[in-house]
Image (tube, rainbow, N blue to C red):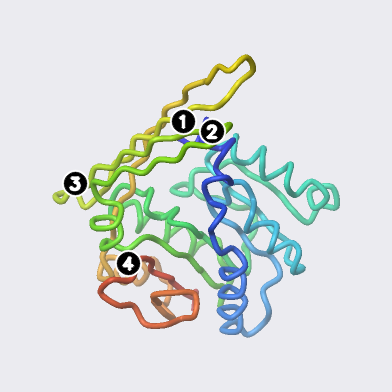
Amino acid sequence: MYESFAAFYDRLMVDVDYDGRMDFTEKAFTLSPQKPRRVLDLACGTGAMTKRLLERGYDVIGVDLSPDMLTIAADRNQSFLEDSRLVLLSQDMRRLEMPFQVDAILSFLDSLNYLESYEELSQVLGRVAQVLVKDGLFIADLHTEYKLSTLVGNDVFYEVDDDLAYIWLNHYDETKRAVEMDLTFFVAREGGLYERFEEFHRQQAFSLEEIEKAVSESGLTLQGLYGDLQMNPLEKESERIFLIAQKK
């Protein structure tokens, strides 16, 4: 997963509101008695959010399962690596371990949807709670069940550009409440040839009740579930859940 995808991940994420997520994060940080200094970016991907955190003065640990994603994150944030304000680690979030605690943990852009069950969600939140300091914050967003079942569902997405084309086939399993994604990429090479890459992704839907239960069982205290970056309430057709929890 994300092996060949890493090279053009940022092309597909060009419309993501990273700055809005940064503003949301700093608004959430006001819940902490002291401004967070050390932040863990969980499932940091290619380091776009990591860079914004660093630019606003935070020290960051970026964690991702994919070495390919981390390579791009390192290139993007090379100067911060050199002055020791950034550490990048390859870890599975289900087995998250740190030699020290951090002030805040972020996990944006539906990384939690890649967990395959409630048990895995509960496991990750338990790890998060262990790594956070007292009053530390966990901030995340994930796709709603409405979005995965209705807007992503059994749809097909595609794009054709001069140097890249892709076909994205989705299948939603109502019993498992999960969407399976078959991605095929065609990347232009020299001589008019195209190289083909294929990847399989799966995203799991979690209900609000499951999220609230997993947060509670982990030892965290839920501070808010929102429907957008402006912290408006969740609605029936909200596409994302924005989550803030705190270790008390």
Q: Are marks 2 and 1 in contact (CB under 8 Å)?
A: yes
Q: Would you call the spot at circle 2 few (<14 residues within 10 Å), some (14-19), or many (20 or more)?
A: some
Choose between 168 and 112: the one closer to the eye: 168
Query: Around disc 4, counting alpha carbons within 10 Å, would you say few (fewer than 14), some (14 to 19), or many (20 or more)?
Result: some
Which numbered marker is on residue 173?
3
Q: Amino acid at mark 4?
A: Ile
Instruction: Name which residue lies at 37% across and 39% down.
Output: 168
Which of pointers 3 and 4 lies earlier in the amino acid sequence? 3
Label 1: which residue?
185
Asked if residue 54 is positioned above or below residue 153 in the image, the reply reads below
The residue carrying mark 2 is: 164
**Residue 68, how many percent across, how many down?**
60, 34
In this rendering, the label closer to the viewer, 3 or 1: 1
x 74%, y 69%: residue? 56
Residue 211, label in figure? 4
Asked whether, in this view, residue 72 is left or right of residue 212, the answer is right
- x, y percent for residue 15: 54, 57
